[in-house]
Amino acid sequence: MLLAKITEQVEKLALRTNPQYAITLLGKMPPSVMASLQRRRFRETLKIANRTPFYSKQFRRRNIDIRKISHPAELGDFFTTSDDLKVYGAEAFLAGRPDTVFETTGTTSAVPKHIYFSNSELNQMGRMSALGLYQLGLRREDRVLSAFDVSFWVSPAVVRTAFQYLGCFHAEAGKISPLEFYERAVIYKPTVIFGEPSWLVRLTEIAEKRGIWPVKFIFAGGENIAEDTRSEVERVWNAPFHLNYGQTESFGVIGVECAEHDGYHRNDMNFFFETPESNEDGEGELVYTTLTRNVMPLIRYRSTDVTRMVDERCKCGLFAKRIAKIRGRVDEMIVCGMGNISPWVFAELMNGVPNATDEWQVRIWHENRRDVVDIRVEASGLNVPGVHQKLIDDIRQNMRMRFPDFQKNLDMRLYELRITGVERGSLRTGRKLRRLIALDAPPRETEYADRDALAQDIELVIG
């Protein structure tokens, strides 16, 4: 206990000094000291969580005596899920007075999850983020332009706080079109650019044609990116492209890549990470417990992301251990250039479309620097002239009306949308129809029932 308290004081001292000294100081902590700090903070977090309606009820119902728990694994089969946040509501998880709130869309419905925080928690996460950005090379003399979407998203707030600690010049453009961003960024010539991967790819295509300026690095969050596409972005800008991994529930930063691009250096000071149901290769769903949150603590939160823990030291020499690159999700949510998409999104797109049935399937793959979202829906009357095109038009109209953010990303050319009607009975091959399929490579032949419709659809996307 004494060792953990001393370690905590060292951490506080480190985070109030210059970033380079902080990284050096924290790097001298032996693994046993970090483990002791985590256990102490975990026990404190359990006490705080026990004040909330949700956790106090769950602990009583399961006969969990938190005084006897010193490690998350000792909670057995108890976890917190995304559904818990939606069903019980954020208020059931509140242990203190919040100062701010952010939202994240659910994976199986349109109902958003509300995640509350305090300003002190924002400051603490900003300090930790500042250390990661400093390690990547961000300095006071840099000029940063961020294109993160500020609409209820946590990432802009966290990086803004980090920029304040680093003292660099920064401006928030918001998620405007890449073309408009380029035309306005030329005035500032930012040395570091922040944005979502697919958005940055489109910006890169514009910059390749119109000209680049010296950039130190590019930083992305919100989705993964194919390695060949990352290489193309780096080639055009002649600068490294780094990814961040996080969730709104985690308050942004869970881990950040280093120059090695070999996983995310994880934030063990603020989280307790587990993969309790891993396979023989150590891969499993990432589960995390917050360790420094007093407003809305989360105990063993299921991230739905599949990864593995990497404890061996990285070649970059940084003290922080890593999380391997995310392999996929245990639910049916896919993050791509369209956005965070789940089956309910496409069910809503088909809703009210004449001739469309409830049998549909979506395939996503990466091709020519962009994600391709290929919607196939069983429909009747496809042999009647104009029916197939009417099907395409109606689905597109639904997206414009019901999902303006997805339409916005399409207008920015962050992905390609392809729609085709197929004959009844052509999609289902078993008892269940798999709704979303992520392909590792483009299919050999896109299965459009009408080649003229395919050509016209692609023309709509490109033109």
Image (cartoon, rainbow, N blue to C red):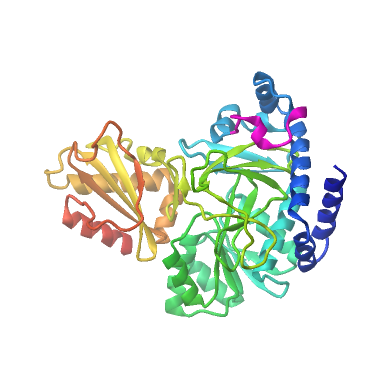
The C terminus: image quadrant = bottom left
Give residue 177's position: percent from left, percent from top. Answer: 48, 63
Give residue 68's position: percent from left, percent from top. Answer: 75, 28
| Rendered residue at 30%/58% (across/down) | 442
Q: Is residue 173 left or right of residue 404?
A: right
**Residue 71 on the magenta segment:** yes
Decide which of 9, 175 is in the foreground and name it: 9
Decide which of 329, 384 is in the foreground and name it: 329
Give residue 277's position: percent from left, percent from top. Answer: 53, 38
Q: Which residues are magenta?
A: 67-80
Residue 180, visible in the rendered structure: yes
| Rendered residue at 38%/46% (across/down) | 399
Q: From what the image shows, is residue 226 above or below residue 1? A: below
| Rendered residue at 12%/43% (across/down) | 384
**Residue 23 on the magenta segment:** no
Residue 118, visible in the rendered structure: no
Residue 319, quarter of picture: bottom right
| Rendered residue at 57%/39% (across/down) | 276
The N terminus: image quadrant = top right
- In this rendering, the count of numbered labels is 0
Q: From what the image shows, is residue 230 above or below residue 2? A: below
Q: Is residue 21 left or right of residue 399?
A: right
Check the image and name the residue furthest to the front.
280
Give residue 299's position: percent from left, percent from top. Answer: 66, 36
